[in-house]
Structures are given as C-alpha cells and as structure tokens.
Amino acid sequence: MKTRTVFAGILFIGLGLYFLAGQMESPLFHFFQGWPALLAICGAALLGQAHSAREYAYLFPGFLLLGFGVELLLASAFSAWPRGVNMFFFLIALAFFASSRKQKGGAGFGVLFLLLAVLLTFSGRGQPFFHLVQAGLSSVWKFWPLGLIAIGVYILWTRRK
C-alpha cells in the first residue's frame, strides 16, 4: 500500500464502532457483533484504500470480504435470507466483475462463478432442465474436482506470452 492513511482510518473507525456496539445494551447494536462484522469492516477499509489511492488490486479482496461479511450478517438476522454455497459463488462473481472494471482481467472468472451460482441455486429446486442435466452428468459429477485440478495445472504450466 502506497499510503495507508485511508485504510488505517476506516479500519480504526470500524473497529471503534464495533467495540462501541459491544458495550451498548441495544439489540440493534448486538446485530453488528461477531466475526462477520469484522470481515465487513476489513473489506470496507480495503475498498476505501483502493478507491482513494487508486490501488485497484485491493478491489477484489475488498468486495469479497465486505460481501461475505454482509451476507453472513444478513443470514444470521433474517431467516428468509438465502443461504448456501451458491450465495458465496455469487459474491465471488460480483467481486470479479467489480474488480474487472478497473483492472484488465477477471470478467471471465466472474462469468464462471456466476454460472456456478445459478446452477447451484436452481439445481435443487426441481427445475426440469437442471434435473435432466443433473441426471445426465451424475456419474461425471463425482469427478468434477479433477476438472478444477486440471484447469489449475494448465494455468500454472502454460507459458505466458
């Protein structure tokens, strides 16, 4: 980080509010306690640093931490809030899309994670199309981690031009 003033400022303000909320007796402030709030505070600090110092490498982790923190806070507060791995894939896709606007890459990974989120969201709901896909690929589904390993090995071993 070139200048840490924005990151440190937002982090100290967030931590001060976090510990102040812990001392208050109100149930509203109790909502902001726990490690998901700390994730959101760190993510907000990274986003502030990314935008103020034009250090766009901090956009992805900032959006990711802020998104995970807010998602976990809302999931614990509202019983109707969507939960599951699909929400985390959706947040990863949003982080890739947001960072790709300022950096030169990442939109392809955003599309990949968005497709995974959509697939996981609708595959368990009895949709006819996803049921056919799931039935057709059930034997291959056991080995999908090998595909991820193969993609990772390909990315690591191919030479960059």
Image (cartoon, rainbow, N blue to C red):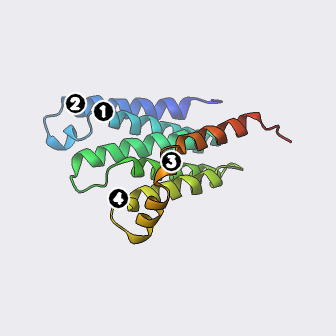
| Type of the residue with mark 4 | Gly
Does label 3 or label 1 sit earlier along the sequence? Answer: 1
SS type, badge 3? helix
- Residue drawn 49% across and 29% down? 8
The answer for how far apart the CA atoms under marks 3 and 1 are is 25 Å
SS type, badge 1? helix
The answer for how far apart the CA atoms under marks 1 and 4 are is 37 Å
Horizontally, residue 67 falls left or right of residue 84, namely right
The answer for how far apart the CA atoms under marks 4 and 2 are is 39 Å
Which residue was labeled with disc 1?
A: 18
Q: Which marked residue is nearer to the observer: mark 3 or mark 1?
A: 3
Q: Nearer the viewer, residue 43 or 90?
A: 90
Pinpoint residue 57: horizontal percent, then vertical percent.
Answer: 63, 39
Does label 4 or label 2 sit earlier along the sequence? Answer: 2
Does label 2 or label 3 sit earlier along the sequence? Answer: 2
Labelled pair 4, 2 in contact (Cβ < 8 Å)? no
Q: Nearer the viewer, residue 69 or 91?
A: 91
The answer for how far apart the CA atoms under marks 2 and 3 are is 30 Å
| Type of the residue with mark 3 | Ile
Which residue was labeled with disc 2?
A: 22
Horizontally, residue 13 falls left or right of residue 150, namely left
